[in-house]
Amino acid sequence: MTLNLAVLPGDGTGPEVTREAVKVLAAIAKAEGFEYKTAEFDYGGDRWMREGEPDEVISDAQLDELRAFDAILLGAIGHPDVKPGILEKGLLLRARFFLDQYINLRPVKLYPGVDTPLKDKGPEDINFDVIRENTEDLYCGCGGFLRKGTQQEVATQEMIATRFGAERCLRYAFEYCKAKQAAGQGKGMLTLVHKTNVLTYCGDLWFRAFEEIGEADYPDIKRDYNHIDAACMWFVKNPEFYDTVVVPNMFGDIITDLGAMIQGGMGIAAGGNINPDAGGVSMYEPIGGSAPKYTGQDVINPLAAIGALAMLLQTTRDNAGQFAWKSAGDRVENAIKATTPKLESLGAGRMGYSTTQVGDLVCEAL
């Protein structure tokens, strides 16, 4: 079975880190004995400006072309000469909505040798997963302005929750938690994060769906609930408490960045925008931005992009619906764990190795 991969290097240092991820892909494909093909697409700030700043960063036809691939590997989006929001909404959010990537999967894992700002916490304490709903909530863009530019200006933006959207995310989270427990890698506890004491409509919908689905179909999974502000507190104070967390879109955006920092920073954190349905195509990316000031210097840490590749291999299904490349993804993750103790720091230019050399270290660890 050949892995057919679309590569979107993107902006800034994105091409540098995706280059290393593809280098690791070549090494693990050889080690595991599978074939792969890549096709590169230059969607991003440079192309958008080169084409005369079109209305669309990526068109429906171009997005539809990506459906032909098994998965998408994204580098980074963000260009210093493009107004913030254009590329993020025009590419990232459009892809998530168009390809119905309704799950954002964010492992929060502290790897060996990586510093955390949390005192006395180690890899055994920081090891949980956040499952964020990825296509509803405030990101739907429902709202607008009244009397814009005047002293009486009004701006509205609505939080949207549907039972359909909440339920499919919750079911994915329950199944994910159940699978972790069966593999001996979790506690069998799913924590819902919301703000039900204030958001009494959207929060109520999510909480009722959580309780009803859990009681009816997952009685062996312990159910837990945190308000969003409490979760932010407990992520810092007692991260070891968590196993699997499920959260709506906006709150998920907040706590996954917090999760990235307690696991050592944006240079190590990877995420997946996942459509788990049959025939769905998912997109994997490092969590950090394009870091344009480091472009071309070969100093940016590529481990988040390599971690995104590991996730891609672990969670992408082949044409038969099987996780054909999971063992390869597990080997890449283990190679990352073998590499992190060798690095001085995960900040740009402070690793003790260049971007290229870190990619080489991971290949050697395979």
Image (cartoon, rainbow, N blue to C red):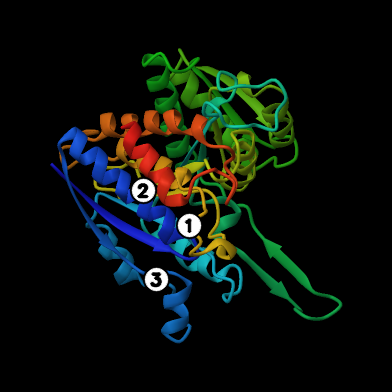
Determine which quarter of the picture holds residue 204. top right
Residue 113 in sight here? yes
Label 3 SS:
loop
Q: Is residue 155 left or right of residue 24?
A: right
User: Seen in the image, is 321 located left or right of residue 339?
Assistant: left
User: Label 2 is placed on what type of residue?
Assistant: Ala
Query: What's the mark number on residue 58?
Result: 3
**Label 1 secondary element:** loop
Disc 2 designates what residue? 21
For marks 1 and 3, give the CA distance.
28 Å
Kindly report which numbered mark, 2 or 1, lies closer to the viewer in this rendering.
1
Identity, as a three-letter code, of the amino acid under mark 3? Ile
**In the image, is 65 to the left or to the right of 222?**
left
Give the residue at the far bottom of this rendering. 52
Q: At numbered mark 2, what does the secondary structure look like: helix, strand or loop?
A: helix
Disc 1, disc 3: CB below 8 Å?
A: no
